[in-house]
Amino acid sequence: MSHYQELIFDPQIIRRFDVSGPRYTSYPTADRFVEAFDAAAYRSWLARRTIGGIGRALSLYFHIPFCNTICYYCACNKIITKDHGRSAKYLKYLGKELALQSAALDGPHDVIQLHWGGGTPTFLSHDEMRRLMEMMQKHFRLLPEGEYSIEVDPRKVDRETVKLLAELGFNRMSVGVQDFDPRVQAAVNRIQSIEETRIVIEAAREFGFKGISVDLIYGLPKQNVISFNHTLDEIIKLSPDRLSIYNYAHLPNLAKPQRRIHESDLPSPEAKLQILQLAIRRLTDAGYVFIGMDHFAKPDDELAIAQRQGRLHRNFQGYSTHAEADLLAFGVSAISKVGPTYAQNYRTLDEYYDALDRGELPVMRGIELTADDLLRRAIIQALMCHFELSIESIEIAHLIDFASYFAPELADLREMEAAGLVSIDDEWITVEPKGRLLVRVIAMVFDKYLRADRERVRYSKVI
């Protein structure tokens, strides 16, 4: 097993195998969840979380859907408003949901991981942030060694806010940048200076944050190799611990704000590949390790260490080091993972509030995984996180004969093997350096639902 993941960028291979596909933050993916899995089903799983005497620490996620302004590229579940009356009401209902989930929860209420996402969690005023943390700590206990992260919009955050976040217990921060080029920023309605960004990152270091992550997007309108190279210059100077470089998927039918982006301004598929290739080269030259998909980290970052030690995991916040934690999620559209289940909350404020007014958990849909789902989830996780799969460990854990159970999948993988994306022997399936950027295309081979309906659902392009 290689210590540092090698990566070979092969544009021809990428073009040949680049198909639409999910990002596998869960398996089965959220579009497979069913309404028959409801609040009662979720409640029953919360109540038997410790069957067998296991009381693992929890991961908590809070979805704060509000943003002051709209970024045209965004496909998240969000509400654009300047009205803090709306967030005050939302917090009141988060309090109700906290009380309901906490009351239904069996076993210890210790938390090892916390994430506030959105929207823009820093939309909340200082008092609102304090209030949300207090409500949470009424029901849960943050462990001293935990990982507590928040997504930050540098346009709305100053040194004082970062200081408050540190006081509240946050020790990791994800900073949205996307691109520093002024023309690109104007085209996506997100004007953000390098200086604003630097102030936040320097404040985070000053107040003891353990990890700072930066989000970039490639494929945005007006972007080109030269302009993105300047952005990368600035990012490398800021020296974050982790970086995510997301592919912009232009799906204006699904994400309304994207209708304000002119298709003629988007870089060609060829130019997009060149931007991605440049980013990978610049970041690896600067000492970052390719973790997988769209994530890079410094070699001494916990993600890189976890990957080298074989304990990296993937969940709704991307790559993670807390594989064993049950995830309780709060707020509109948020997805929980407890035992062999997923549960997703209602996506609109009205439905979310109505359920809580009835004293019910606001679960819209979910799924209880079958033995086959759990088996395939383990395989997809291993490929996405470690670029390799021990066939024997899967056979032992799931009591199957791999070669006969996955005969059609192995046949499909042979074409990828011939192209140099994977190598397969009796003991291991290994994603080769050429296949690493296409790891989710390889994972898709094991997705039973996709196999059943190849063409029915359109996902964002992989690269």
Image: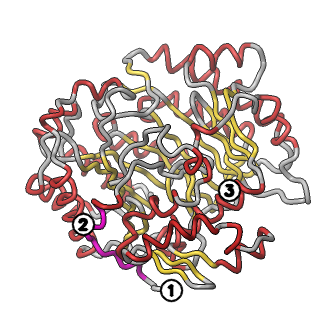
| Residue at left offset 57%, top offset 70% | 410
Residue 425, above or below 56: below
Magenta segment includes 366: no
Dot label at residue 143: 3
Mark-to-mark CA distance, 1 and 2: 26 Å
Disc 2 crowd, CA 10 A, few/some/many (<14, 14-19, 20+): few
Q: Secondary structure at mark 2?
A: helix
Most foreground residue, 201 or 358:
358
Q: Residues within 10 Å of mark 3 (few under 14, many from 20)?
A: some
Q: Amino acid at mark 2?
A: Gln
In the image, what residue occupies the spot 40% across and 50% down? 174
Mark 1, other Cα within 10 Å: few <14 / some 14–19 / many ≥20: few
Q: Amino acid at mark 3?
A: Leu
Question: Residue 408 in the image: x percent, y percent?
Answer: 60, 64
Q: Is residue 384 above or below residue 203?
A: below
Checking the image for residue 12, the label placed there is 2
Residue 333 badge: none
Between 50 and 409, the one lying in front of the other is 409
Mark 3 or 2, which is nearer the eye? 2
Q: Which residues are magenta?
A: 4-14
Q: Residue 455, how many percent across, how many down?
A: 47, 42
- Given residues 70 and 302, the one toward you in this image is 70
Q: Please say if 240 is above or below 175.
A: below
Question: How far is the residue under mark 1 from the one under mark 3?
Answer: 33 Å
Residue at (41, 60) in percent of width and height: 293
Q: Residue 426: x, y in percent? A: 62, 85
- Element on which disc 1 rests: loop
Q: In this rendering, is residue 450 above or below 409?
A: above
Q: Which residue is mark 1?
A: 1
Q: Secondary structure at mark 3?
A: strand
Q: Earlier in the sequence, mark 1 or mark 2?
A: 1
The kind of residue tagged 1 is: Met
